[in-house]
Amino acid sequence: MKETNGRYISSTFRLLSLLFILLFSAQTVCAQLADSTAFKGYLLNKEYNVYLRINFYDRNIIVSGQEVFGELPGYIAKEGSSYCWMVTDVTIDGNKAEMEMVNDFGSEDLTATLTQENDSTYTLKHRSGATIKLPNNGKWQKLPSTMTFKKVRR
């Protein structure tokens, strides 16, 4: 009886250990899947009528009308304008993405951080370099150094 009882305890321990490993693996996979969409999509700031179109994972965003630049991680633009700032390089670290950006003339560049605050809210912070300027009613509009964006479906 002791030998059977020992086998029972041993097999129960193995089963519980395997179950724990499977649950931990499933949690890790789910977290990775959730993270793979955090920096992908269309982000809108209604106050300034500007948007970010990004895919920092596949880096396959094409700027409409400016296909000559090829596939990029993303860009920021104003509704109704072809002028934009393109994301040329990005590094993701948890809920933050450090971006290198250049205007579509190639005359100015900057570094900014995009932080995911929750599932639908992001904060863009200018770190260094040129100020983001976009056309607004025939004039250049300087955007603030910190802006909030909402993820929207398009």
Image (cartoon, grey):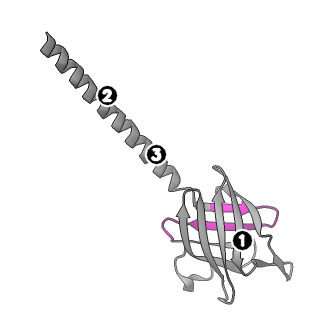
For discs 1 and 3, the disc positioned in front in the rendered view: 1
Give the mark nearest the N terminus, 1 or 2: 2
What residue do we see at 52% from left, 81% from top? 70
User: In the drawing, does residue 13 fall left or right of residue 121?
Assistant: left
Q: Secondary structure at mark 2?
A: helix
- Which residue is at a point 52% across and 77% down the rendered structure image? 71
Residue depicted at x 48% and y 47% = 31
- What residue does disc 3 label? 30
Viewer-nearest residue: 97 or 39: 97
Tell me which residue sits at (13%, 9%) in the image: 1
Q: Callout 1: helix, strand or loop?
A: strand
Query: In whole angstroms, how far apart are the C-alphas of marks 1 and 3?
Result: 31 Å
Asked if 68 appears above or below 114 in the picture, the reply is: below
Q: Earlier in the sequence, mark 1 or mark 3?
A: 3
Q: Which picture quadrant has residue 3?
A: top left
Query: Where residue 126 is drawn, which disc sits there?
Result: 1
Q: Is residue 63 visible?
A: no
The residues colored magenta run 42-60
**Distance from Cα at disc 1 to Cα at disc 2:** 50 Å
Amino acid type, label 2: Leu
67, above or below 44, in the image: below
Q: Picture coordinates of residue 97 (x, y %)? A: 59, 64
Residue 20 shown in magenta: no
Name the residue tied to disc 2: 16
Tag 2 near tag 3, CB within 8 Å: no
The amino acid type, in three-letter code, at marker 3 is: Cys
Question: Quick one: 16 or 107, which is closer to the camera?
Answer: 16
Which mark is first along the chain, 3 or 2?
A: 2
Q: Kindly identify the amino acid type of the residue bearing the numbered disc 1.
A: His
Q: Does the magenta segment cover residue 53?
A: yes
Q: Bin the neighbour count of mark 2 within 10 Å (Cα to Cα): few under 14, some 14-19, many 20 and up.
A: few
